[in-house]
């Protein structure tokens, strides 16, 4: 019997759950996806139903297998990637979920963060993260306060806590494994950046019992095997796990210092690989763990934009400007470039390098001549401007400025947007050779661990060629437009007391 040569990649994102089957040649041979319901119980609160997440996973795996025309015996391993920072509690004994999943966008702990800003310096030095509702620790503390016995039950070992990867690993292994990888753990604000392990002082500070946290492994490791599932047989190993942005960096073949990528999904996330040592940012970028193949930590600088594709989704679903997100491209092309519309998409606060959690979205420059096309253009530009800010900050952190930016995610299909991004960066942008770079990253970690590819050189040959979009805007015009953007952002931050 031939050895199995396919990888099942699970990509559990903010707006959907996807399963993709990859073969040993790096080809996507079957996929399926389900959208997720977004719950907004109060302004600034964002939740998911973890049972809906699980149900979506149960649905998409058989569909992807059927489309790929593969059997479970063809699967060498499972790779898992997930929305980061989103967190929930469940019972160890029954596996029953006890809370909603608080999504990374959720801002309900903003008051705690504001009240404890004086502690941010040592937290930043210890974790590489600013004190912000974005990260999991304050969310876990909030969840533990919702029932009088939660904390005591957590201390006694009855309640488990985890990001979405941990929850799915628990379910996939029949409740036998409670684990996470270094990339997801580094986004909780409970992991010591320098030791790549849980930090007792951080756990005490955020009042999170250490007993409820998962074991931390490298991104390519043995995370258990499937057990007791109606849609997969027992014994398929889970060998690759990484948070979505680190998975995308790996999937863009970003594995050495100086490699950088931006993923445009619900939010947009810029990562710059810095090798085997962490850089403490002087410009409010984050320091995070990069995906690893062994116990030796690897690091990256990261900038997070909370609203990217979500801005286009808002134009589609909230304002009803168009029926398909792809229509934003044709609208932007039809916009009058003389209409002075600037959109700062701070719906759930502004991330790096501003870290202003109380801001909201603001439109500047509306006139009686402003059209839906101008709003579409401004929304896309608002994303591109934010990434330009992140790249500028990153260039100040390192001795060698970026020469190009690798890009992936849903917005990469928008050619107008990619040209806009190149123009505002003054750099070439290079779309990934894999349409699903995040899932490919998870599949790659699992495949390398499983021995599908004998070494990194063999795997890197799968990168293929990619197109390149070069800037067309003059440096003078670029600087003028960036100056107007910065004026608008500063006005929003000042208005909301940032």
Image (spheres, grey):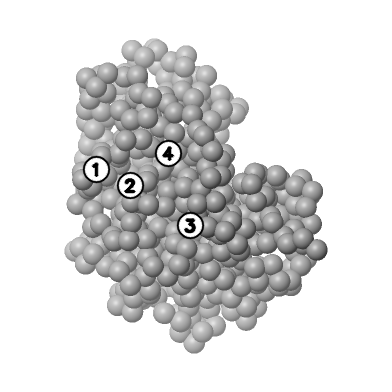
Q: Along the polypeptide, which appears first: circle 2 or circle 3?
A: 3
Give residue 197's quadrant in the image.
bottom left
Image point 48% across, 71% down: which residue? 217
How far across and down, in percent of the image, does residue 244 sit?
49, 53
Q: Which residue is mark 3?
A: 243
Location of residue 458 in the rendering, given as x and y in whole percent from the top left corner: 54, 51
Q: Nearer the viewer, residue 477 or 89?
A: 477
- Residue at which label 4 appears: 406
The residue identified by callout 1 is 400
Q: CA distance from mark 3 to mark 1?
A: 27 Å
Q: CA distance from mark 1 to mark 4?
A: 16 Å
Where in the figure is residue 98, as x and y percent of width and height?
57, 71
Q: Which image quadrant for residue 142?
A: bottom left
The answer for how far apart the CA atoms under marks 2 and 3 are is: 20 Å
Above or below, comparing residue 346 to residue 471 in the picture = below
Q: Is residue 426 left or right of residue 147?
A: left
């Amino acid at each position: 019997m031939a050895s199995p040569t396919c990888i099942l990649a699970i990509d559990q994102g903010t707006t959907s759950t996807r399963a993709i089957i990859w073969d040993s040649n790096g080809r996507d041979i079957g996929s399926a996806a389900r959208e997720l319901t977004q719950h907004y119980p109060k302004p600034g609160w964002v939740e998911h139903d973890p049972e809906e997440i699980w149900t979506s996973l149960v649905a998409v795996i058989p569909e992807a297998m059927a489309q790929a025309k593969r059997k479970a015996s063809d699967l060498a391993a499972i790779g898992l990637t997930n929305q980061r920072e989103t967190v929930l509690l469940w019972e160890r004994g029954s596996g029953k979920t006890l809370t909603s999943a608080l999504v990374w966008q959720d801002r309900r702990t903003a008051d705690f963060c504001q009240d404890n800003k004086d502690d941010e310096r040592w937290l930043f030095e210890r974790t590489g993260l600013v004190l912000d509702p974005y990260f999991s620790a304050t969310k876990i503390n909030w969840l533990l306060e919702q029932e009088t016995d939660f904390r005591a039950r957590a201390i006694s070992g009855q309640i488990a806590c985890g990001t979405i990867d941990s929850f799915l690993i628990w379910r996939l292994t029949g409740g036998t494994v409670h684990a996470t990888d270094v990339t997801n753990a580094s986004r909780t604000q409970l992991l010591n950046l320098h030791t790549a392990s849980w930090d007792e002082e951080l756990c005490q500070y955020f009042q999170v019992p250490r007993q409820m946290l998962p074991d931390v492994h490298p991104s390519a490791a043995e995370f258990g095997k499937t057990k007791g599932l109606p849609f997969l047989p027992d014994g398929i190993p889970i060998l690759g796990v990484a948070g979505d942005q680190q998975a995308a960096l790996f999937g863009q073949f970003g594995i050495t210092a100086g490699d950088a990528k931006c993923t445009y999904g619900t939010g947009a996330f810029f990562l710059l690989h810095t090798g085997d040592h962490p850089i403490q940012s002087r410009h409010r970028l984050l320091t995070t763990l990069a995906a690893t193949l062994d116990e030796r930590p690897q690091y990256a600088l990261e900038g997070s934009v909370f609203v990217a594709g979500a801005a286009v989704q808002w134009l589609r679903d909230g304002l009803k400007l168009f029926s398909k997100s792809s229509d934003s491209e044709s609208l932007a092309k039809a916009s009058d470039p003389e209409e002075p519309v600037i959109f700062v998409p701070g719906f759930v606060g502004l991330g790096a390098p501003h870290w202003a959690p109380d801001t909201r979205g603001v439109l500047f420059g509306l006139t009686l001549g402003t059209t839906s096309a101008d709003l579409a253009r401004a929304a896309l530009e608002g994303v591109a401007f934010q990434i330009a800010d992140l790249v500028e900050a990153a260039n100040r952190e390192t001795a060698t400025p970026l020469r190009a930016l690798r890009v992936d995610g849903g917005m990469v299909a928008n050619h107008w947007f990619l040209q806009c991004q190149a123009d505002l960066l003054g750099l070439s942008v290079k779309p990934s050779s894999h349409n699903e770079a995040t899932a490919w990253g998870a599949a790659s970690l699992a495949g390398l661990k499983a021995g599908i590819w004998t070494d990194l050189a063999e795997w890197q040959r799968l990168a293929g060629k990619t197109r390149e979009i070069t800037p067309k805007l003059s440096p003078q015009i670029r600087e003028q437009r960036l100056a107007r953007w910065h004026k608008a952002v500063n006005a929003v931050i000042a208005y909301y007391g940032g």
